[in-house]
Amino acid sequence: HYAGFLKEEKTRLARILSILGVLLYGAFVLVDYFALPSAFSYALVIRAFVIAIFLVGYALTYSKHFIKYYSFIISLEFITAFLGVEAMIFLASPSDQAYTSYFSGVIIIMIALYSWTYLNVFTTSLLTIIAFSGYMYIEFVIRGLSLYESISVLITNLFMFGSAVIFGLLAQVLRDGYLRKNFLLQESLKAAYEEKAKEAENHQHLANHDQLTGLPNRRYAKEKMEMFMERVKQLDMALVIMYLDLNGFKQVNDVYGHKAGDKVLKIVAKRLKSCLRNGDCLARLGGDEFAVALIVEKSELGMAEAIADKIRKAIEQPIGFKGYKLSVGTSIGMASYPASGDQVNVLMDIADKRMYKDKLKNHEKAKLKKEKAELEKEVKESPVVLYFPNSRGV
């Protein structure tokens, strides 16, 4: 994570550094005119070359491989900048102000090296040695000055150079330390925020959904139905609301226990989902009651009947539990907009009443079926007596 964070920071600072390099190197042309009159034309060429390197460096920051070659690109910019200033010092005649004063340019570049880059200590140290060695080479080898002749200037420059290095190193260490702490703080705050957001999301989910089946609860289902109602009114479509109640669920709980009842509810919820389309509303209202909301074309209300039949068949399939086959059925009541009303509460109330009527009807069917089965059993188990009349008719 920190490497990714530093990647953005490296790229950002590299671009700023390149732009500053171009501006400062370009602006100092005015200084060259007065401080380096003996080699002004050469100074222009040197500055143009250094500015070109900075521009190339800036362009490379937009390459996807920039971070991979970051140390090389930044080092090239600084070596060019160092050598550019030292080349102008070399070209300056003793009468030029640049002869003694341009060393301050090396100091400025040195400060930028430590405070505006993310080069490692080895690389910055190597660049420091190259910069200082180049200056010493010009003074003692090319110019052939003796230590005695330039002792005061060298001591001053050495002191300034060393001070720049010390301040630069301290600035680099402090900056990197604060940057890492800032990153860790940001990550900590981000993690805390994400945790709180997740907790809030979980609380919201628990407040809106049934814990057993994971379906929306009554309150959340009503909110979704209200949104469905607004949509169908805008699109001139139909809204169908179904109320479902399981038949035989109480017997499952009484005979096999609540664990069996919970399993039945979970399986029923899955089967209901498989019967519906993506985007349809399915909710558990409580106990063994469910609700479904469908948006259909006004000319396709028959689709709701087909879905209801599909739901009945799916729910009636046996459910395995500890070697037993549990069976439940369902009673369904439906109401639709615009035929039954234009308010969700009205449709829900109508669907509830129709579901209750369907339940009574199913109850009567089940009762008749049971009575018929008992009668058939009784007839089957009754003894059969055959009468054979004798000659007297007895």
Image: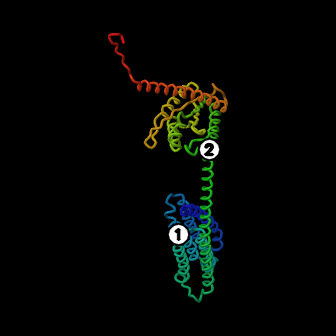
Residue 98 visible at all: no
Q: Amino acid at mark 2?
A: Asn
Q: Which residue is mark 2?
A: 208
Q: Is 223 placed above or below 47 here?
A: above
Quadrant location of the C terminus? top left
Q: Residue furthest bottom?
A: 148
Residue in view at x 48 percent, y 35 percent: 327
- Say left or right for 238 vs 328: right
Toward the viewer: 36 or 276? Answer: 276
Quadrant location of the N terminus? bottom right
Q: Quadrant of residue 363?
A: top right
Number of callouts in the render?
2
The percent position of residue 295, horizontal first and vertical second, equals 58, 32
Categorize mark 1 by other alpha carbons within 10 Å: few (<14), some (14-19), many (20+). some
The dot on residue 267 is none
The percent position of residue 291, horizontal first and vertical second, equals 58, 35
Categorize mark 2 by other alpha carbons within 10 Å: few (<14), some (14-19), many (20+). some
Q: Is 210 placed above or below 352 here?
A: below
Gap between marks 2 and 1, in whole Å?
Answer: 59 Å
Q: Quick one: SS at disc 2?
A: helix
Q: Is 315 placed above or below 207 here?
A: above
The dot on residue 75 is 1
Disc 2 or 1, which lies upstream in sequence? 1
Toward the viewer: 216 or 262? Answer: 262
Residue in view at x 58 percent, y 31 percent: 242
Q: Amino acid at mark 1?
A: Ser
Residue 84 visible at all: yes
Toward the viewer: 290 or 327? Answer: 327
